[in-house]
Image (cartoon, helix red, strand yellow):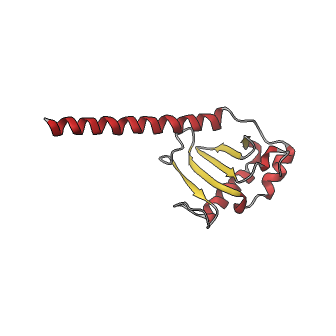
């Protein structure tokens, strides 16, 4: 009986943690997709065209309109010196190039996030600096 109670408590704790993580990721996804600052202006488009993988803190590619915790896609980090598990400059470059090729649908948020839904995929880059803000360069 005691082991059964402990197992049930552990299962409940695990479910609560998963629920909290899912809520946090859904909140992040909602903020990125629904609270966008809008399409890029001409200066932001020009800046996007000049960005390199070294300008990117991280990139995400995953299923569109899904949680962005990593269960429906992957995060990639661009700097070899960063302390992350998934350092992959080639994938960061790929995501950045997808956004560059589809600049008409790219939106920005907070001056440092560029994102687009293309087909059934979400593509996001998080810049190291607020270069898409227009005033910061």
Q: Nearer the viewer, residue 105 or 112?
A: 112
Which residue is at the far top? 34
Tell me: 9 left or right of 65: left
Quarter location, residue 33? top right
Q: Position of residue 105 (x, y in %)?
A: 73, 42
Tell me: 60 left or right of 36: left
Quarter location, residue 84? bottom right
Which residue is at the far left? 1
Residue at point 34%, 37% (across, down): 13
Residue at point 29%, 38% (across, down): 11
Residue at point 68%, 45% (across, down): 115
The N terminus - image quarter: top left
Q: Position of residue 129 (x, y in %)?
A: 74, 52
Q: Position of residue 110 (x, y in %)?
A: 73, 40
Tell me: 14 left or right of 57: left
Compared with residue 94, is residue 36 higher up or lower down, i.e. above or below? above
């Amino acid at each position: 009986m005691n082991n059964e109670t402990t197992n049930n408590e552990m299962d409940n704790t695990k479910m609560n943690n998963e629920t909290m993580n899912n809520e946090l990721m859904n909140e992040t996804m909602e903020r990125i997709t629904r609270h966008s600052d809008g399409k890029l202006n001409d200066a932001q488009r020009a800046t996007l065209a000049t960005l390199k993988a070294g300008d990117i803190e991280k990139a995400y590619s995953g299923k569109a309109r899904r949680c962005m915790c990593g269960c429906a896609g992957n995060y990639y980090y661009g700097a070899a010196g960063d302390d992350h598990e998934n350092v992959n400059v080639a994938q960061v470059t790929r995501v950045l190039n997808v956004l560059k090729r589809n600049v008409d649908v790219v939106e920005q948020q907070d001056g440092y996030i560029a994102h687009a839904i293309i087909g059934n995929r979400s593509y996001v880059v998080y810049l190291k600096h607020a270069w898409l803000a227009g005033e910061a360069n």
